[in-house]
């Protein structure tokens, strides 16, 4: 694999150098999780391979944490990661060896040498790479997907997109020009951060569109990691493109557009008369998606592809959700929500989504899921919970024995990000138990930093006390022993901290 690498180009050499110099911080991303891809594909009528035993390929795997987290949480799968940077791969191999993971493999290679050599995979992911590599590498990514995707497999490729990247691209050009004579990448990042804040403060006229665009980008970069700024704004290659252009390229390789990894609104979900406006402009889903990008100024896509000869089929809402699992995202604002009455109750998620409803069915679903959090409910179990909660007060507009309104509401709430749907229930401890045992990956990460990866593929920020405790949770020590080794912890704080870890899927069963 490594001996047949094509002749390096100046762009690929520069990319390799930048990643070796400042490795990308490889945080887990649920949008690359095979469960996310499988759920999105099933919602579009494609019967996909089981996530529990999936063969997963990641192109541009960075330091491997994304795949290693999958191997820890879903040990029945097989995972392969490829990256151009030898420094990235060395880090990935070292971490996998430390954790004793035999079902994950990594290799340093130029993607242009690999089409037709990798075998078959159920899920292929390529995050944060496509827009940052030369045209021949972009072609290689699609060629690998065409050669290696299983018959009913799904690929997810992310890329920067227009029209949103027109403004961001202007800012990128300004930053690259400002640091043009700065040799070291870390120094370039520091100067770019400083210049971005000066631009945002001094842009004229204050309150105008230009000042607004600079202010928005300055806020993003202020909270961004150095590696993000280096590789998103300062790398030599960044080629955004329109959704329809990307899909046209994929179709040349025998691949077909399936949709997006994250829930997408239907026309009926859009605010005001936006849905009617889109319907009047186009009746093809791809064209509607492109027009929606124009209205939203969207700058990034996570596009799902399948083989052109795969066969998604139309399903009713009930057929779609019967095999899926639901997990709470929204929490009722009221401590005692009035589910059975026709009164408004408000719900909010941790990441800012909000909704209100007077519908007892909607309220009962969200409350039932929250009561079972952090666990999941099957459709049948959720239906039973709702029936019990509304017994004797079932709304006249519904029939208690009709599951269709529940299925339709479930899909609508998923599209609105008020709950999440899944194909697989990841096993983790919802209670600490007698001798708590943390995820081995989270324990290893806690030794060196505050960000750790949960068994649900989330990034959790820990304070110093939580980090020190997490490092001790190897499953051999009870509370008495933990308190003896952590004299700064009271019994009450120990229980509170362990409960926090259990709720955030950091503890193994």
Image: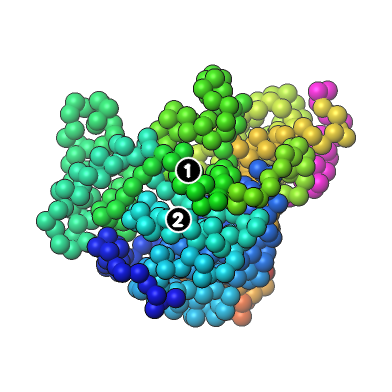
In the image, 462 versus 116, the foreground residue is 116
Q: Image check: 268 left or right of 92?
A: right
Q: How many marks?
A: 2
Q: Is 97 drawn above or below residue 408 in the view shown?
A: below
Give the residue drawn at x 39%, y 45%. 160
Task: Please say whether residue 354 is one of the residues in the magenta stretch.
Answer: no
Q: Position of residue 322 (x, y in %)?
A: 77, 46
Task: Please say whether residue 396 is one of the residues in the magenta stretch.
Answer: yes
Q: Disc 2 designates what residue?
A: 127
* The residue positioned farthest toward the left in the image shown: 181
* Dot label at residue 248: 1
Secondary structure at numbered mark 1: helix
Secondary structure at numbered mark 2: loop
Q: Image check: 345 left or right of 286?
A: right
* Dot label at residue 484: none
Label 2 neighbour load within 10 Å: few <14, some 14-19, many 20+: some
Label 1 and label 2: CA atoms lie apart by: 19 Å
Q: Position of residue 489 (x, y in %)?
A: 50, 68
On the rendered image, what quadrant is the N terminus found in? bottom left
In the image, 360 versus 218, the foreground residue is 218
Residue span colored magenta? 377-397
Q: Is 392 drawn above or below residue 30 in the view shown?
A: above
Q: Nearer the viewer, mark 1 or mark 2?
A: 1
Q: Mark 2 and mark 1 in contact (Cβ < 8 Å)?
A: no
Quarter residue 19 falls in = bottom left
Q: Position of residue 200 (x, y in %)?
A: 22, 37
Give the residue drawn at x 57%, y 31%. 284
């Amino acid at each position: 694999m490594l001996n047949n690498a094509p002749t390096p180009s100046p762009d690929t050499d520069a990319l390799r150098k930048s990643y070796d110099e400042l490795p990308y911080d490889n945080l887990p991303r649920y949008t690359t999780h095979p469960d996310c891809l499988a759920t999105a594909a099933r919602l579009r009528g494609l019967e996909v391979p089981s996530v529990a035993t999936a063969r997963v390929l990641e192109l541009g795997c960075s330091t491997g944490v994304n795949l290693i987290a999958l191997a820890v949480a879903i040990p029945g799968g097989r995972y392969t990661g490829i990256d151009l940077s030898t420094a990235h791969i060395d880090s990935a191999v070292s971490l996998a060896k430390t954790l004793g993971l035999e079902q994950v493999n990594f290799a340093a290679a130029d993607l242009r040498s690999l089409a037709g050599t990798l075998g078959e995979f159920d899920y292929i992911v390529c995050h944060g790479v496509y827009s940052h590599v030369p045209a021949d590498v972009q072609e290689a990514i699609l060629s690998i997907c065409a050669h290696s995707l299983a018959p009913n497999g799904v690929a997810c490729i992310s890329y920067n997109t227009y029209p949103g990247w027109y403004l961001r691209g202007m800012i990128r050009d300004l930053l690259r020009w400002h640091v043009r004579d700065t040799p070291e990448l870390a120094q370039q990042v520091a100067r770019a951060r400083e210049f971005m804040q000066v631009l945002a403060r001094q842009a004229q006229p204050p309150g105008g569109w230009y000042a607004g665009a600079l202010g928005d980008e300055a806020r993003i970069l202020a909270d961004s990691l150095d590696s993000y700024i280096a590789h998103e704004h300062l790398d030599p290659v960044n080629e955004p493109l329109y959704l329809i252009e990307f899909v046209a390229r994929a179709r040349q390789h025998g691949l077909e557009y399936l949709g997006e990894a994250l829930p997408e609104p239907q026309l009926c979900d859009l605010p005001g008369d936006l849905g009617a406006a889109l319907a009047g402009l186009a009746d093809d889903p791809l064209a509607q998606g492109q027009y929606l990008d124009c209205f939203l100024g969207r700058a990034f896509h996570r596009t799902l592809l399948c083989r052109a000869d795969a066969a998604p089929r139309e399903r009713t809402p009930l057929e779609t959700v019967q095999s899926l699992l639901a997990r709470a995202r929204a929490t009722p604002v009221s401590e005692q929500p009035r589910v059975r009455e026709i009164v408004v109750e408000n719900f909010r998620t941790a990441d800012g989504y909000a909704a209100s409803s007077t519908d007892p069915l909607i309220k009962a679903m969200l409350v039932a899921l929250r009561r079972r959090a952090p666990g999941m409910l099957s459709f049948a179990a959720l239906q039973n919970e709702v029936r019990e909660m509304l017994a004797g007060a079932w709304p006249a507009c519904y029939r208690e024995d009709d599951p269709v309104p529940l299925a339709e509401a479930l899909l609508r709430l998923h599209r609105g990000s008020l709950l999440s749907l899944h194909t697989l229930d990841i096993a983790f401890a919802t209670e600490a138990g007698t001798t708590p045992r943390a995820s081995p990956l989270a324990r290893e990460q806690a030794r060196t930093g505050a960000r750790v990866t949960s068994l649900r593929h989330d990034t959790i920020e820990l304070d110093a006390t939580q980090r020190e405790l997490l490092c001790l949770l190897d499953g051999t020590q009870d509370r008495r022993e933990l308190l003896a080794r952590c004299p700064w912890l009271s019994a009450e704080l120990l229980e509170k901290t362990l409960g926090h870890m259990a709720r955030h899927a950091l503890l193994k069963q």
